[in-house]
Amino acid sequence: MAASNVTLCGICDSQHVSNVANYWCHECDEGLCSTCKNYHSVSKASRQHGIIPMDDYKKLPAEICKIEQKCKKHDRKFQMFCPRHDQLCCLICIYENHKECTGMYPIDEAIKSSGTSTLFDSLEKSLKDIKKTIERVVKNREDNLVEIKQQHLKGLNNIKDSRQK
């Protein structure tokens, strides 16, 4: 049953050869065996691709792995980001839907600046504030439940005392 957890080399698999992938290319979105990784790393078309060991790829959160890298409508790789629509765009999308949009920039630039942008810092601070607020609300609700239970017991005791009198 461990075979279902094994990723095959995409290049070998397309040639009907079953080799286990030891690396992952996020640009090609497929696994690579050691031999194909070497060819992949020297090919002019793919030498700039980011290749990581398969063990590191499997440690990534599922949400990261599910991020689409191609436009579903045109089956082309996303290349630009439109801040006006807050949307990733392939070249055909730009031509069809974003002719009037200004300020578009390459995804590579967006990725480089995302970790240092003030928007990212602001978002991080907002999330921390929200977390503190939620923790405060939960604590408040727990305190309320304890107080309600105490009032309930006090009410029962008052009824019991009234009956005895």
Image (cartoon, helix red, strand yellow):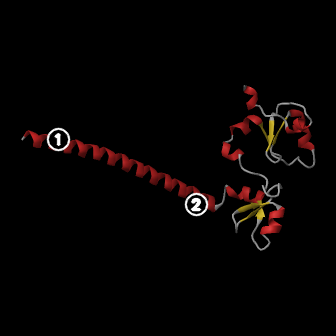
Residue 32 figure quarter: top right
Image height of 103 relative to 38, above or below: below
The residue tagged 1 is: 157
Image height of 100 relative to 60, above or below: below
Q: x, y percentage for residue 56?
A: 73, 37
Nearest-to-viewer mark from 1 and 2 = 1
Seen at 37% across and 50% down, the residue is 140
Quadrant for the C terminus in the image: top left
Q: x, y percentage for residue 64?
A: 69, 46
**Mark drawn on residue 3:** none
Quadrant for the N terminus in the image: top right
Seen at 78% across and 55% down, the residue is 72
Q: x, y percentage for residue 29?
A: 80, 45
**Which is more toward the observer, 95 or 54?**
95
- Give the farthest residue toward the left: 165
Q: CA distance from mark 1 to mark 2?
A: 52 Å
Seen at 76% across and 36% down, the residue is 54
Type of the residue with mark 2: Ser
Relative placement, left or right, of 163 versus 139 is left
Q: Secondary structure at mark 1?
A: helix
- Give the farthest residue toward the bottom: 100
Q: Residues within 10 Å of mark 1 (few under 14, many from 20)?
A: few
The residue tagged 2 is: 122
